[in-house]
Amino acid sequence: MRCELDAWLKDAAPSLPEHRCADVLLGVNEALANCAEHAYRGRANGDITMHATYDDAAHRIRVRISDHGRWRLNSVAQRNRGRGIALMHALADHCSVDRDGDGTTVLLDYDVADDLAH
């Protein structure tokens, strides 16, 4: 998925600087890693979907990552981990994590107008 997103970014926003592409890729990678590690823990498989859009008029990249797993609170043994959500918030201009009985959806928005102006 990461390679596909990288190729899509280069096509959708070819003027986007490499460091900003890296921000998008790292933020999305963290969301995907959280899905893989937490949503389907104890299960052999599960679906993860990713949908990315680029709004040329608003200069905004939006990536939505969803799973149909279950949210799990970190155990005591995992308390020294869990930096992924903070990293997603730091890299994206807007980050939301919504969970309900159907799974978890992470929405990452990257406002890139300033990046494209340079």
Image (spheres, helix red, strand yellow):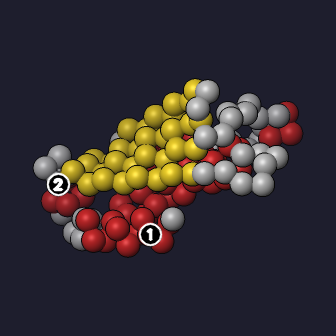
Classify residue 76 by image quadrant: top right
Q: Which residue lies furthest to the top in this view?
A: 100
Label disc, if present, on residue 4 of the rendered structure: 1
Residue in the foreground of this view, choosing between 118 and 58? 58
Q: Where is residue 60 in the image (x, y as percent from the top left)?
A: 25, 49
Q: Position of residue 94 (x, y in %)?
A: 38, 38
Residue in the foreground of this view, choosing between 25 and 101? 101
2 and 1 marks in contact (CB < 8 Å): no
Report the mark closest to the observer, 2 or 1.
1
**Mark 2 — residue?**
56
Q: Position of residue 6 (x, y in %)?
A: 41, 69
Q: Residue at the spot x=26%, y=54% of the render?
A: 54
Left or right for 82, reference 23:
right
Q: Residue at the spot x=51%, y=31% of the render?
A: 98
Left or right for 114, reference 91:
left
Residue in the foreground of this view, choosing between 45 and 59? 45
Residue in the foreground of this view, choosing between 114 and 75? 75
